[in-house]
Image (cartoon, rainbow, N blue to C red):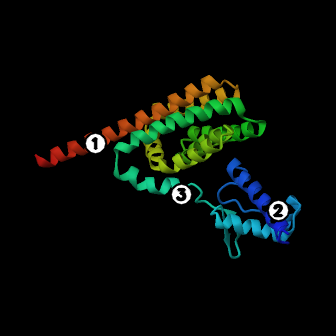
Amino acid sequence: MAPLSSPVVRLADSVVNEIEKQILDGALRPGDRISSERKLAEDFGVSRPSIREAIQKLVAKGLLVTRHGGGTTVTDRLDAPFVDPWQNMVKDHPMLHSDVLEVREMLESQAAELAAQRATDVDMARLDKAFAELDEAYANKDLDQSIAADVAFHQAIAEASHNVLIGHLTASLMRLIHDHVTNNLKHSHTRPAQWEQLRSQHRTIWKAIKANKADKASVAAKEHSVYIRESIENNALDAHRRISALRRAESV
């Protein structure tokens, strides 16, 4: 005879699976607070003990975090096992920079292509909002807002691809290259032509996805990523030349 607790375990596992799906799909995002036990029990049609057990399992898996007086939230460290070991590696080994940026080119090109094919009305509404905020930030030459909006725009595209790994890898990659993105935008911010070029590229990507033109979206995203990589490489070369010039001047 099966133990009496087995139905509760099965119900708890079904709740675990459903909440995991919501996290993977992006319906629940890092830092989001989940509903109360009572509300979850109503939503899933199970008892509060089953909900309590499901939450405990998700906490044990590292997907949820429970804080005294702060409720239960989705962990903001979901991508940490991927990002953390590489953070210092990329910082300490400059030859890895181009490798990381090449991965970004492939990932964002594929994400844009799939988004153009798969984006739902809800995805497009989110992408429209992300683009509008990005374009406004660029128009106002608001550097800090542009950095945040840039990341949000590319993440919206990744999630509109409806490929779970692309969504999470993009989030991980943007964390990994955040300093590169920030420094490149700071550099472009002082150069009107580059600033407007980036703004135009984002608009081209958005329009292609909105028009469901997968090939055009893929090419536009690829060209954008290549432009960014070349800009970062040129910025690094300029910095190296300036340092070399200063050293020569000091030695005279």
Q: Residue at x 73, y 36 (%)?
A: 124
Q: Nearer the viewer, residue 94 or 126?
A: 94
Reading the chain from its start, which is encountered first: label 2 or label 3? 2
Q: Are marks 1 and 2 in contact (CB under 8 Å)?
A: no
The circle drawn on residue 43 is none
**Can residue 112 be seen at all in this image of the molecule?**
yes
Residue flagged by tag 1: what amino acid is it?
His
Residue 2 percent location from the top left of the image: 83, 68
Instruction: Name the side, left or right, on which 67 lies relative to 83.
Output: right
Q: Residue at x 35, y 52 (%)?
A: 92
Residue 221 percent location from the top left of the image: 56, 31
Q: Is residue 240 above or below residue 28?
A: above
The circle drawn on residue 240 is 1
Among the 4 quarters of the image, the one containing residue 245: top left
**Can residue 144 be seen at all in this image of the molecule?**
no
Residue flagged by tag 3: what amino acid is it?
Ala
Query: Which mark lies nearer to you, 1 or 3?
Result: 3
Q: Residue at x 61, y 35 (%)?
A: 111
| Mark 3 crowdedness (10 Å alpha carbons): few <14, some 14-19, many ≥20 | some
Q: Secondary structure at mark 1?
A: helix
What residue did someone put label 2 on? 11
Instruction: Name the side, left or right, on which 188 lies relative to 126.
Output: left
User: For the residues marked 1 and 2, what is the alpha-carbon distance in whole angstroms?
Assistant: 60 Å
Q: Residue at x 47, y 40 (%)?
A: 189
- Locate the N terminus by quadrant: bottom right
What residue did someone put label 3 on? 80
User: For the residues marked 2 and 3, what is the alpha-carbon distance in whole angstroms?
Assistant: 30 Å
